[in-house]
Image (cartoon, helix red, strand yellow):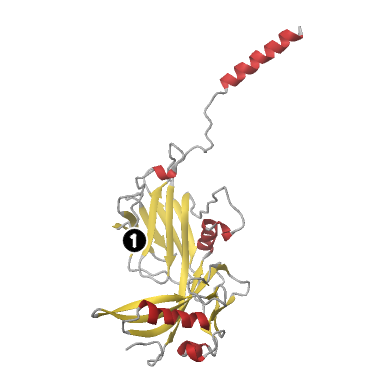
Amino acid sequence: MSKYISLLLNILATLFLLSCNQPFDPRAPFQEQLVVFSVLSTDRNVQFVRVERNYTPSDFDPLAVVVDLAIPDAQVTVTDGITSYRLRDTTLPRLDTSRFKSPLHTFVMSPFSAQAGRTYRVTVQSPGLVSATATATVPSKSFPSMGITVSMVLDNPDGRDGNAEMLFNAVLSSSARGYVGRLYVDYDVLIGSDWVSGRTEIPLAFVDPKVPNLKYVTYPQMAARTSTGFIALAFKNSVYAATLNSISFDRYKSNKLIFNRVVFQILQADKNLFNYFNVAHAYRDAQSVRLDEPMFSNVAGGAGLVGAYALDSLVHLLPEDFAYNKK
């Protein structure tokens, strides 16, 4: 009797397995929606909003899709709570055509600069799709400053100790979530018969102070806002002098050259842009390997990013008899 029961159970199990022979697809049901990307900023008088639709590749390879899914008939508006702006559609040259060949379709608002401390709401509508909205608050103005002795080092780096630090400070906005401070030197170089403007970023320090090689240096990185909002960055004079020397005697050794100014910049990122940056950079954890691909989106009714940043600068003019000038 037990043999018959075992045989019956085996038959039932076989029939059950055959009835469950369905292809497995780990993806959730696909729902078409708007994908919006925009970063509003205070340092330019034109703002862009990219609008596309999402897609699901048939063979699990997203790179197999080579047709740009931009939506040229979308309606894009930006409002600050007082005034609404309707963006116009346009196309821009696509620098990288290895995947998409068509020009870059975008929506533009010009002339327009985002105002520090103001909140903007981006709304995108397209026939047949759910409207997408997102807001971003531009951080209010920061207050960059520099130490009392910094100007003396900037004006005469060779007359100061190489280990001398040039200290730059700033008080960040309460609405900023992240920041990065950078130091640049601006100059004019005579190339042929034309004076051309140039800019070079000055690193923070050498990786190994005993090996003063500009190939091995550290640069400021995006960091979270401190609880007090006060930040300080110390740049090494040895790196500053090495950068000037490289520009004057390596890069443009046979050209006339005038150094004009040193510019300290503070970029303040709002919470949306800072969170997106951290997700895109996998939290900058060099000790582990992530197999998942986390996604950040602050767009209601769709996907994507609408963020903002504010850029403030402190300018120090260099003297006319600057030692690295070549007139």
Residue type at numbered disc 1? Val
Q: Residue at x 72, y 12 (%)?
A: 6
Q: Tell me if mark 1 has few (under 14), some (14-19) or many (20+) residues whose alpha carbon lies within 10 angstroms of its own.
A: some
Q: Position of residue 11 (x, y in %)?
A: 64, 13
State the residue in front, 172 or 79: 172
On screen, residue 210 above or below 47: below
208 lies above or below 98: below
- Up the image or down, 324 lies above or below 250; here it is below
**Percent coordinates x, y for residue 234 in the rendering:** 56, 79
Query: In the image, residue 231 lies at what x, y percent?
Result: 58, 76
Q: Nearer the viewer, residue 168 or 304?
A: 168
Q: Name the residue rendered at 37%, 92% in the picture.
A: 320
The quadrant of the image that shows the C terminus is: bottom left
Q: Residue furthest right?
A: 2
User: Is 91 on the left or on the right of 115, as rendered?
Assistant: left
Task: Kindly tell me whether residue 169 is visible in this rendering.
Answer: no
Q: Quadrant of residue 229?
A: bottom right
- Residue bearing mark 1: 108
Give residue 228's position: percent from left, percent from top: 62, 75
